[in-house]
Image (cartoon, rainbow, N blue to C red):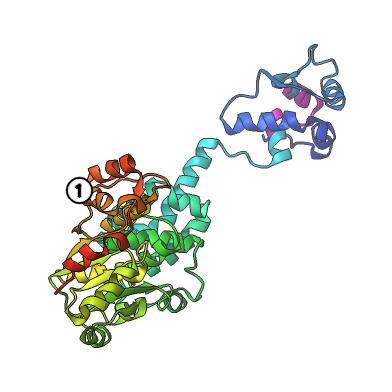
Amino acid sequence: MSEPPVDEARLRRLLGGADLAWLVERARRRLERGQPLTGPVSLAAPSPAERAAAESLLGRTPGAGRALTVRLDAVSAVLVRSGISPDGLEAAVTVLTGRVVPVDEVRRSEEQAWREAYEPLTLLAEDLPAYAAWAVRVRDDGLVRRLARTPATARPLLEQTVRVLRELPVAPARSLAVFAADVLGSAHALDDGTPVATLTLSGARALTGHPGGAGAAWRRAAWASAGLLRDDVSSTVLTLNLRGTPAPEWMADAGEPCVLTLRQLARRPLRTAPPVVHICENPAVLSAAADHHGPDARPLVCVQGQPSAAALTLLARLHELGAAFRYHGDFDWGGLRIATTLSAHVPWQSWRYTADDYRAAVAAAGPDLRPLDGKPALSPWDPDLALALSKHALRVEEEAVLDVLLTDLAG
């Protein structure tokens, strides 16, 4: 024979008010944790109305003291005796708040939902092993959960991400916006800051080996490493006497500097490379080499500060074709950072860019040098260089050693 049903109308009058909501909530929390509805629960700073409601429920004062303490088994007994809830407090809580799902069951259900959400990622790793380690990492480090928050949001996010990653790398290179429109249906789907762009760029870097970093220039270079161009004409690199496609060939014949865009480098990569390419930081060096040596100058690339996506694309292509690099930059903290950034992308050897070269430059320049300022940096290719800069605290720009650099650039 089934138990009589809960008298919901009387129950809501007795326990459904705002002044006893804390009591119902504590009882529900215990049920969710699988704990019995016995023993006391307390409210640290009750209002007079909450005290009065508890007293009315129990027919007596709940107890002295600042906190309000109520025994759950006493509340259950009231419900049973009155006939409001013959099964006691647990049945009453269910009527008032809905079905109680134990925390363990919620956790198991949520984990199952996450496993199902990760299925596109699992299939990607099985089909394309190049993504396998990355797929494990973004699951383990919580990137997907931080971006999606819920399994229901994660599934479509991962489906979109996998759809893009299966198309990479793109060759020949394409506009990122046009590619996004074709693959995801919106030209803005891979805009900075969107979850799918963040996750996709992470996967693209895993595929191409592009080093970590931050900032707009880094993101542009990271996309370009997978053949996707965020801005294919404003990113440029300055060169002298490189060959391999018509534009630099013509300029090399004239011994004049050549500006190459990211679009040119991605769509028409160089076909040949010289054995050695010198790299400088400042345009003044390249301009002087063109003035002094013209078409006889050794091949030279100028990064113009932190390397642009175009510069990194060009250097990666030259490295792929077998070129070796010799690098020189300003002797200051910014110059050291540029050199370190560059070394994360392509290998290079010092071109008069060591501690000995710095000390010689300081001695030759005399009192005309400016004081060194800014935050110190390291020089992994020659640790003594950073120490020498700290000791002398003088800045030596490339223009101050231009004569000796030009000697090296004579063909």
Q: Type of residue at label 1?
A: Asp
Up the image or down, 28 lies above or below 335; here it is above
Q: Is residue 3 visible?
A: no
Residue projecting furthest to the top:
64
Residue 207 screen position, x and y as percent: 29, 62
Region of the chain picked out in magenta, as a range: 76-91
Which residue appears at 46% of the width and 76% of the height?
Answer: 177
Figure quadrant of the N terminus: top right
Give neighbour class at mark 1: few <14, some 14-19, many 20+ (Cα, 10 Å): some
Which residue appears at 28% of the width and 50% of the height?
Answer: 362
Residue 319 screen position, x and y as percent: 19, 67
Magenta highlight on residue 77: yes
- Depth order, front residue of 152/16: 152
Q: Is residue 237 visible?
A: yes
Residue 135 screen position, x and y as percent: 34, 54
Q: Main secondary structure of the magenta part?
A: helix
Up the image or down, 386 lies above or below 338; here it is above
| 161 relative position to 2: left or right | left
Magenta highlight on residue 355: no
Which residue appears at 33% of the width and 78% of the height?
Answer: 260
In the picture of the structure, the residue carrying the numbered disc 1 is 356
